[in-house]
Image (tube, rainbow, N blue to C red):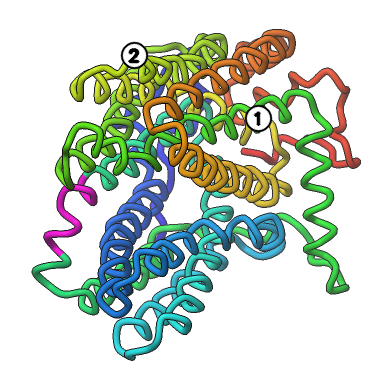
Amino acid sequence: MAGRQTGRHRRPPEEQATYREVFAVGEFRALWLAQALSFVGDQLAQVALAVLVYDHTRSALLTAVVYALTYIPPIVGGPVLSGLADLFPRRTVMVVCDVLRAGLVTFMALVPMPVGALSVLVFLTVLLGTPFSAARAATLPDVLEGDRFVAGTAINNITHQGTQMLGFLAGGAIVAVVGTHEALALDALTFGASAVILIAGLRPRPAPKRREGDSLGLWRGTRDGARLVFGDPVLRSLVLFAWLCAFYVIPEGLAAPYAATFGGGAVTVGLLLSAMPTGMVVGAFLFSRFVRPTNRLRAMGSMSMLACLPLIGAGLHPPLWGVVALWALSGVGSAYQLAANAAFVTAVPAAGRGQAFGLAQSGILAGQGAGILIGGAAAQVLGPETVVALAGVLGLSAAAMLTLVWNQVRGGVIGGVRERAGPVAVAASHAGGDDLPGGVSRSASAS
C-alpha cells in the first residue's frame, strides 16, 4: 500500500524543507528508490554495451554509434510520447515502461545478436524511458508540496550525479568481474524491481486528461505543449535556462582528448568526467539547504553565468588540478537548474505537465547531443582547450541575455512564492492573466 504523505499542512512559503521531511513521505521513497535502482542499472548497461559492441566489432565508430542511440530516441520521440503521461494514469505509464524495458534488456542479455539488431533494441529501450521520465516528473509535484518539491528534486539530482561518479569509477570493474551479458541481466532486474516498488509504494491516480477519440491526440498534444511553453514569457525563460546546459556539457564530451593534452589515460579521463557531477552534488546540496526559496529565484541568473564562466579559464591552459577545479566550479553553478525546474513544474497546469516536461527534456538532450557533436568537430581543428573556452564564452553570453529577460519577469514569480505555500505559488505570477496560451486554464489541481 502506498505510503501517505505526513504533515500535509501548508508551510510558510519561505520555510525551507529538510531532507528528513522529504524522505518521511512514503511515495517519494518509492519514486526515489525506483530511480536509484534504474540509475545504477543504466550505468552498468552503458559500460556493458560499449564493451560488448567493441569486442564484437573492434570498431570505435560503431561503438560510438550505439552510444549515440542513447541521445536520439528522446529527441525524435520525446515531444510526442511524453503526452502518454497526461493521457493515462501516470503510475501505469511508469510500470508498463519498466516491464517493457526489462523484457528488452533481458532479450539483449540472453540472445546473441548482430550489432544492427542490438542497436534497434537499445533504441527502443531508451525510447521507452521518455514517457517514464515524463510521468515520473509529473507525479513528483503530486507527492511533494512547496519547498519539499525543491528538496526532493535536489535529492534526485544528487542521486543521479552520485551514481554517475560511482559508474565512472566502478562500472568498468564490475563489468569485468561479472561479464557483459550478466551486467545487462542486472540492468533488467533493476527495471523489474522498479516496477514492483512503484506498484507497492505509489498511490494510483486517475489520468489528468481525457483521451482523444482520434489518433492525432498525441500530435495535437505536442503542438499544444509547445504553444503552452513558448507562448508564456515565464515558461519560455525557464525552459531556455534548462537548455543552457548545451554549452557547459561540452567539456564532458571532450574529456578524452583533453586528458591526452596532459599525457593522461583512463584515470585522467575519469577524473575529468567526475569533476562536474561532483560540483553539481555540492552545489545542489548548498543551494537547496541554505538558500531561501525566493532567493533561489533571484540567484538563478548569476548561478547560470557561474556554470559557464569557469570554462573560459581553459583558454589559459591551466594544469590538470586547475582544470578539475574549474569544471567542478561550473558544476556548482549548474545547481541553478533546481530553481528553474521547480518554477517550471509549478507553473505548468497538472494536465499538461507530462507534455511540457517531455518538450523540455527533448530540448535538453538535443542541445547536449548537438553541443558535444559540434564541440568534438571543432576540437579536431582548434584543440579541446580552445573549444571549452569558446563554449564558456558563448554560454556566458547566452546566460547573460537570459538573465536580463528573467529579471524583468521574475518579480511576479517571487511574489507568488511569498503569497502561497504550495505548487500553485508560481502559477499566479504570469502577466498574461488567468489563462495560459492555448486556452488551458491554471488550476490549483497542480498540487
Q: Quadrant of the C terminus?
A: top right
Q: Residue under circle 1?
A: 240
Please, is residue 314 above or below residue 23 in the view? Answer: above
Give the total number of marks visible in the rendering: 2
Amino acid type shown at disc 2: Leu
Q: Main secondary structure of the magenta part?
A: helix
SS assignment at label 1: helix
The span picked out in magenta is: 166-174
Q: Nearer the viewer, residue 305 or 145?
A: 305
Left or right: 57 as drawn, with respect to 174 = right
Q: Residue at x 20, y 77 (%)?
A: 182
Q: Is residue 313 magenta?
A: no
Q: Which mark is residue 316?
A: 2
Give residue 128's position: percent from left, percent from top: 54, 67
Question: Residue 198, image x and y in percent?
Answer: 42, 62
Q: Does residue 89 sit above or below 295 in this rendering? A: below
Name which quarter of the figure residue 279 lies in: top left
